[in-house]
Image (cartoon, rainbow, N blue to C red):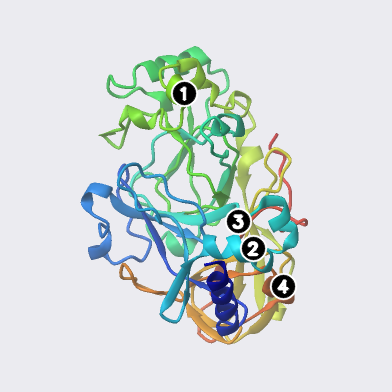
Amino acid sequence: MSYQLKEFTKKTMDSYNGLLHLAPCWVPRKFCIPGRRLKLHPDDLYSLGAHRGGIDERWFASTCNADNGPGTPLDEGLSYVICGNEKMLLKDLIDVSGVEILGDTVMNKWGGLKVFSKFFDNMDALPHHVHLREFHAKNIGMEGKPEAYYFAPQVNFAENNFPFTFFGLEPGTTKEQVRKCLENFENGDNKITNLSKAYRLETGTGWLLPPGILHAPGSLCSYEPQWASDVYGMYQSIVANKPIDKSLLVKDAPDKYKSDMDYIIDIIDWDLNVDPHFKDKFHLTPISFGNTKDKGYEEKWVVYGKVNGREVFSAKELTVFSGKKVNIKDTGAYGFITIQGHGKINDLNFESPNMIRFGEITYDEFFVPYSTAISGVTIENTGYEPLVMLKHFGPDCNADMPDKITK
């Protein structure tokens, strides 16, 4: 099997001029209502079955399984690489050809692709929830999960029902107040967002979110680079008039701690949640690479900043103007999704589609292996509108990433 995977990797990179072509990876969530901005055909929003929930996420360059409980397919959340009529999992290719795909530095240090990105598209807000820190995640054999958000205008033609996100807890909030909310989880609305603060979401900006911070994402469609670990706990009992099952509060607590309220509260990074300078630390505005418009393109950092002193992920927005042809070099492998326009990349046609049927292969998503990234990809905008791509990187790919002090 290893030989077949290596041969497939070589054949794919030869056929696609150094690139890996990825199929759309759709993920449903039972507790969400699709926001209808993923370009998935309206008739296909429940293609995985109404019992599994609507499709409100598309994952990019993912080697992380979606944790959707009993009945979840083994490959849900995993990206497939396409070559002609064949397909293989990106995860399997990296397992046997990781140095060629990610570079020896990243592969030797991290052992694989530790980050993926996604579009999250919900009609309403999500419940106030938290992603586990490293200590608590290790207790269930998982890893902690930092994440970030960027609200691209191209996928936010509608704000949907609640374009505000609750982040953290108001300064001065006590653990006893949170405990009371959790003890009332099954008594209707536990009112935990009364202890938080909502921020109006703005397209063209974003947020950096270390693990351990309570957050109730609003209804903008978000582009989310994140650590490849689907761990969380829902701390809000009712959202958008829909009850949340208490099992989701303790989903990732070890069995012996599922009734231990001290343990559940300890998952919260208290200092970060009550920080009076929360927005200054974690709100992101794009940072331009400089004035390159006269060269036919513009590139910006849209996700940046170290988490607990580590460069865990980063993301860039690349715009190539109509009729221009550019060569773009990077210092690490990356996945990208095309969100506007059409053109050629390394002489391959690619585009941002207007409508996608479930199961259809698109030409908007690719993975750029390390050797191709450092050599540079040639991108030509053959259309009349800007050609826009979002590119996400894993750890130790961008030493020149701007920093934000997070802890």
- Left or right side of 33 for 152: right
**Number of marks drawn:** 4
The residue singled out by tag 1 in the image is: 195
Q: What element carries label 1?
A: helix
Q: Is residue 358 above or below residue 211?
A: below
Q: What element carries label 2?
A: helix
State whether residue 381 appears in this view: no
The mark that comes first in sequence, 2 or 4, is 2
State whether residue 314 appears in this view: yes
Give the quadrant of the C terminus. Answer: top right
Q: Residue 329 carries which label?
A: 4
Residue at image coords 66%, 48%: 312
Mark 2 to mark 3 CA distance (whole Å)? 8 Å
Residue 138: image x %, image y %?
57, 33
Mark 4 to mark 1 CA distance (whole Å)? 46 Å
Residue at image coords 48%, 56%: 118
- Residue type, label 1: Leu
| Pointers 4 and 1 in contact (C-beta within 8 Å) | no
- Residue type, label 3: Leu
